[in-house]
Each structure stands twice: as C-alpha cells, then as structure tokens.
Amino acid sequence: MNAASQPRRTTSSALRRHLILAVLMLCGAWPQSPAAAEGLEGRFEVRSADLELKDGVYHLNARLDLPVSEAVRRGLTDGVPLAIELDLDIERVRQLLPNSRVAELTQRYHLQYNAVSARYILRNDNSGQQESFGNIDAALDSLSEIRGLPVLDKALLAVDRRYEASVRAKVDYGSVPFSLRLLMFWVNEWHRDSDWYTWTLQP
Amino acid sequence: MDLAALTRKYGSTVLGTIGVVLWLVALYLLGEAVQNSALFEKWLPWILLINIAGLLTLFVLLATKLTRLVRDYRRHVPGSRLKGRTVAIFSALAVAPILIVYYFALQFINRGIDSWFEVEVSQGLRDTQELSHAAIEVRVREFLQHTQVVARELSTLSDFELIGTLDRARRESTALEFTVVGAQTRIIATSSDQPMDSLPVPATDEMILQVRRGRPYVSLDTDATGGYVIRAAAPLEGTGNAGARVLLALYPVPQQLSQLADTVQRSYTQYGSMVLLRRPLKTTFVLILSFVVLMSLIAAVYGAFFAAQRLVQPVQDLIAGTRAVAKGNYDTKLPLPSRDELGFLVTSFNDMTKRLARAREETRRSQQTVEAERAGLAVILARLSTGVVSLEADLIVRTANQAAGAILGVDLEAAVGGRFDTVASGSTLFNQFLAAVKQKLDAEQHDWREQIELMSDSGKRVLMCACTELPAEIGRPGVVLVFDDITTLLQAQRDAAWGEVARRLAHEIKNPLTPIQLSAERIQRKFAGSMNPEDAQILERATHTIVAQVEAMKQMVNAFSEYARAPDMHFSRVDLNQLITEVVDLYRVQASAAELKMTLCPTLPTLSADRIRMRQILNNLVTNSIEALEGRADARVEIETHVADDGQKQLAAIVVTDNGPGFQRDLIGTVFDPYVTSKPKGTGLGLAIVKKIVEEHGGRIEADNQRTGGARVRILLPLGENPRSLSGREPRKGEHRRERV
C-alpha cells in the first residue's frame, strides 16, 4: 500500500528562518540565546507513515521523531505545553497537469502536564478526546506514535488512479503569545517544521 | 556641475531620503505583518534587512561625516575647528542623556523581569500545587477504598448477576459510573448516571496493567469538558478467573474543588510558560533597547553634524568669499543662509563685493582708456619721424621712439630703463648729441630749443632739438627731448635757393651774351680790314677773347640752366650694365689717360629710369673722376654695380671710385651743393646735377673718401617700381630736355 518514501520539499518557513539567521549573523548581532539550551533540540522528522485500509476507511499510521531534550522534559513537567500539528495531503498524480488535491487533513495534539493530578494529559484538539499518562515517557511515546487515525473514505479514490500521500508535522514548545513572537522572532527553539514525508498510494 | 560634485552635494540627502522611505516601507510591512502570522514570517527577513540596511546607511553617513571632519581639521580647513567643537558639544548634549536612560533601562529590564520570577512566587505556586494535590488526594484515597469495597462485594457475583447489582451499588455511592470489564477489557456490566449520553469510559492500558499486577489503580483525571474526575480500578477477586474482571469506577470531584484545581493548574501552566520566556525575553528587550539606543545615538550625532553644518556653513562661505575677494575675484556672491545676524553679515559682504566689483570695473575701464591712449601715443611716437626721448632727472631713459634711435644711429628703444649717457659710448653722432644735451641740462636749462650740428662720417648733420621739462603731475621729474634731422630740409632749402639763383642767373646773363658775342664778331668783321695789321691783330685777339669768354659764359649759363631746369623725364626699362658699358666705351674711344674698370653684377635687373638722364649721371661722375685724376700715371676709375638691400626694398647700386686725391674733408658735407668744387675750371654743378637726377629717380647718393685714398660716390636706385611716384616731382610741360654728353 505504501511505496518508497522520501522527503518531498524543504519548507519555505525553514528557508525564511535560515535567511533571518544569515542576516543576524552577517551583522554580528546573533545573540547567544539562553533559550537554545532550553528549547527543542535535535532532528524533527516524520520517520514513517502509511495509510491502512480498514472497513472501507483509510487510517493513518505515522511515527515521529520528536526533538525532545531533557530541558524540554523538565519544561513539560513545569507546565509548558507541547503541541503537534499533523498535516496530511493526498493528491492524484497527473501526467501533464499538476497534481490535483483529493484530501487535506490537519490534526492537532496537545500534551500538557497537570500539576494537580500529577499526570500528563494528551489531548486530540480535533476530537476533544484526551488520554492521561502517569509518566512522561508513556505520554511522549503516545504522542510520537499516531495509530489508526481515520483520514479518507476509500470511495473517494479511483481504483485505476495513482495517488501521492504526504505527511508533515509541526511541533510547538510553549505557548508564546503572538505579540511576544514578534519580539522574539530570533528564538527558533520553540517551533520546528518537519520535511514532507511522501509516498505513493495505489487503491 | 559634474557627477562627483553632484554626489558630494546631494549624496547625503539622497541616502537619507532612501533610508527614510525604506523605513516607512518597513513600518508598513510590520503593521501589516502583526495582524497575520503568515505574513509576518514571510516579510520578517525583509523588515530585518531594511532596518539593518538603514542602520548601516546611517553608520556609513556618520562615518563619512566624521572622516571628512577629521580630514578638514588636519588640513586646517576654515571652519573645521568651529564645526568640530559644535559637533562635540551637540553630541555630548544628546548622547549623555541617551546613555543614562540606556543604563537605567537595562537595569530595569534585568531586575524587572527577574522580579517577575522571584523565588517566593515560584515556591508559592509549587506549594499551592502541593496543597491542591494533597487536598484532592484524601478524597482520591477514600474513593479508592470505596471502589475496593465494592469490588469485594461484587467479586462473588456472576457476570449476569453483576448487571443488576452494579447499578444498585453505583446508586448507593456517589460514583458517576461503575463498569466491570473482563479479559481484553471487554465490558461485562456498566452503570452510569447518564447512561444515554456517553459510552463507558474505556480502561487504559496503564490501568489494566497495574490492576493485573494486583495493585489498585486510582488517578485524578480531567474530562473532555476540562473538569476533574477520579478514576479508580480494583480487581474482582474470588472468582474462578481471578483477576480477569476489573471494576472501573468514575467519581466526580466537587465543582468548587475542581474549579480551584483548574485555577491552580492554569497558573502553573502560565508560570511555566513565562519562565521559559524569561531569559529570551530579557535578551530581546536588551537587543531592542540597544538597537533603538544605537539608532538614536547615530541619529543624534548625525543631527549634531547637520546642525553644526547649518551653523558653520555661512561662516565657511564668508571665509571662502573673503579669500576669493583677496585673490581679486570680486564677483563672489554668497548664498543668503537666513535672515538672522549671519544673514545680515552675508548681505553686507555681498554689498561690499558688489561695490568692489563696480569700482574695479570702473578702474579697469579707466585703465583701458589710458592704455588705449598710451598705445595710440606709442603708435604715433613710433610712426613719428621726429625723435622723442624722455629722461628722468638722473638721465634714466623713460621712453624713446624708433625715430630717435634712427636719427642718432643707436638703439634707444633697447636702452629704456638705462642711463642715457651710457647708451652707446662708441657712437660719435650720439656722443656729440649727448654732450650738447648734457651741457644744457647740467646748466639747469630744461626748456630750450636749439639747432645742433653734428659731424658724421657722411658729413654734417643738423638736428633741431627742443627740450621741455615734464610737468610735475605725471610723477617723477624729468625732461623730454624732441629732435629732428633737418639736414635734408636745409639741403633742400639750399637746393631750392640755388635753383632760383641759377634760373635768374641764366635768365639775366644769357640774354646779353648773344648780343655781346655778335657785337664782338661784328666789330671784328667791320674794323679788322681797315686797321693796320698790328691793330687788327690786337682787335682779333680781343674779339676772340670776348667770343671765347662769352662762349664760356654760355656754357656756364647752360649749366646753371640745366641745374635749375625742372625734369621732363621719360621712364623706360633701362639695363644699367649696358648703359655703363656704352658710356665707358665712349671714354675709352676718347683715349682717356685713366684706366676704366667695370665690375658689373650680371644678375642686376633692369630698372625704370630716364635713359638720357641716367647717361648724364654716368658722364658727370666719370668726367669728375677723370678730371680729378689728371696728371696721375696710374689713374684708375672703377665702376661697380650690385644689388643692395636697405631692409625694405631692393636697390640697384652704382659705385664709382677713383684713386685720386679724394674730396677735401671740409667739403664732404657740401659736395652736392652748387658751386662747391675743388677744381680750378669746375662750375661746381656736376655733382649737384647728379644728385638732383638721382633724387628725381627716387634714389639717394652718398659721397665719401676711401680708406685707401680716392673718392667714392655711391648711388642707390630703387628696383622694380616707378621712381616718379617716389620723387614726388612732376615734370613741367614745355620744358625741353637735352642730353649732355
């Protein structure tokens, strides 16, 4: 069902961020941000993804590599939220014309520590369902493992056509107000975008 | 104005305008971006770039200004010191408060933000969280115990019995929901206070795992609405499949407690997020503050430059204007900076330069007029045939014209500025003139008019000289000498007088000569026959003497007549060489005792002349020489022709020399005067007639003695032009011409 996967394109936001960094470094104004040791670290990517047909509905299974450091774990324990946004695109492949989009889905998850109950709450923002975990590892494992997320009815896909499915994830650490983000545009440790993970889908 | 000058003049203004426009664009983009996060991310690099470019532009402008100021200061450019001081004062006034504000703002940011996260606040929040947890924990334990009790009660029941009993047990407690699950979390029985609204809360893996391990499970959870619930699980023991069945219980948390817990949780979360922002927030504020302060500093210093420039520019203009005026540029006009005191100063300066320019223009015109008059005077002096020399009191030559030098035979124009008595010590003519003049000046005679006679190699020269004292108004004292060579004039006057004498003499004497001759001859014829031979012989001798003397007198009268006769010349092209040869051949035929030698120039061109009168010239000269050589054994007469040049035109020169006694020295100056002769039988008219004919041909004649002895006569005749126009004398009609050979 799923074919060989590859990163499809580098996001424009990453380019812009690199441009900002280049400008700041060019001017010698790049601040030695203390947040660099307190924010997201490491590589953030969609390690694997596929669509599983079950009862006439395609369900998404995906595995994410979260850039979670010890500092992020401490921050989560201190009440800082961690949000994941999952973007799924399904396009019909056309020979001469650009691909046509068949389905588009955005799924948001929210992980936060509840200090009163001393439990980690993982919430699906789309459905409102939530799950609590007694330790952070179980919560992070659950967050990085997307299982059986219904995304598309099989009837929407033609049998004799070829499709491409793409998944991308965004992670936000902390709930920085937009006005503060304006001021702290140069702090890039609170938000990451993964590359697109694309595979071919043959109904 | 070239590109470099335009760049210097308007470069800063253009850069500043571009910077302001870019900043306005950046502000607009920022205003649009803050309303839209996508736009913000898209435009942020450009906003950053514009701001950094603006900062760099300001920095470059400031660096340029500073460099220029330092350079001007080192080169001592006028106004640079004043400008430097003004910039320093303005900068200090602007920079000091900015730096103070910056310092206190930094302190405020550091301490202010730190104070938000004081240890007490953090600890208080933790304590609150602990307290909330402890308060709820008691209730949680109670619900767990209750769940365990119920589980024990239900453990003896079969699955079927459980359905009814479970509902009763829930009603007897405060639980929201009781559910019994079996293997694979299959629901065996459930009871809820809202059975129609929702499905039973599913058992989590964590819950089942813990219960399977024999430990009861209890947790405080949030529900989908954000409220708090207590979840508990306990195994139903005592059945055949022990541990396979688990009782799941859901208990409510009182609303007040739930709200308090929610508040605590929200504060905890917010505080955690704020702690995360703490250090970047400080850094951000410091960066923004530093950026703004830097911009303000640069703008303030640049503003100081601008203000200093506005203050110093009129002063610099005035200095430059003063220097320009000092160099003579009176057209300098300074731009009016304002209507303040500096403006008044500039206006006064402009008025002054305008007046200076007007005065200079008037002076220039006057000078031009004087120069023109002087040039005219110089031309007149140069063209004047009269010599003019002005001398200062110490005999320094102030001015001298060309004619003065020509008359005195020295280059007086080159002697201007030198002493008059040292001009040409070797010139006899000049020294005689100097002696005569100096004698007068030494005697303090400054206004006189006198005829001065000078002796030269070519004879006596007579100058009419007038001396006048220069007026005191023209500066240094001195005299002006005006003199003219009147030798020729006097000669002409003498010639004219002699002409008149000759004409009258011829007229008065010639008329009675013929009757005398006729009468003598008649007496001879009439009385010779009637007289005795002795008397007849006496009579014949007497009458012969009378006739001979009358004939001699006739010849003399004819000569006078010839001299006085006005020319009636017929010009034609004459080959002088050929004419000379003919004349000499004639004398050779007469077997003259003198040797006649000719040295003729073969390239001598023909000239326009009266052939008969030219022949007369040659006859007279050759006759004169031969007569002067009578009695000499080695008598020799040489006739030479050549082409001469007087600097203006070409001349044909005829030089007749002999080896006779030459002219008497005291007669050299008057040899061409009538009746001047050293010969016993000479009429004294030969050379006078020659001179007359030469002058009628526009030529001139010179006579002197050779160094080796013998006379030399040199005739110069113009070549290639009609000498009549030069002679200025027209022949009178009716006059006859004759050739005297």
Image (cartoon, coloured by chain):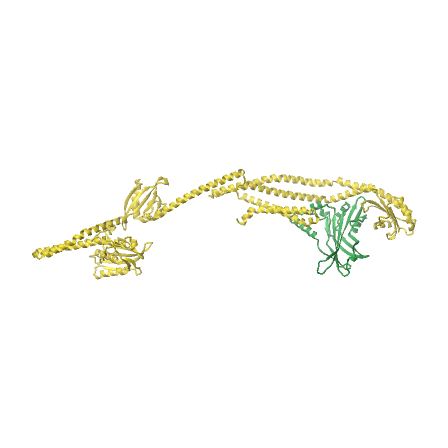
Chain colours: A green, B yellow
Q: In this view, does B445 lie above or below A103?
A: above
Q: Residue furthest front?
A: B734
In percent of width and height, residue B488 lies at: 28, 49
Q: Where is the C terminus of chain B found, in terms of image quarters? A: bottom left
For residue B520, which quarter of the picture? bottom left
Q: How many numbered circles does the render carry? A: 0
For residue B712, which quarter of the picture? bottom left
Residue B237 appears in the figure? no
In percent of width and height, residue A203 lies at: 78, 59
> In the image, B63: left or right of B463?
right
In percent of width and height, residue B205 lies at: 83, 51
> In the image, B247: left or right of B455?
right
For residue A55, which quarter of the picture? bottom right
Q: Is residue A139 above or below residue B473?
A: below
> In the image, B452: left or right of A48?
left
Camera-nearest residue between B692 and B440: B692
In percent of width and height, residue B674 lies at: 22, 51
Q: Which residue lies furthest to the left in this view?
A: B532
Residue B564 appears in the figure? yes
Camera-nearest residue between A78 and B174: B174
> In the image, B235: left or right of A82?
right
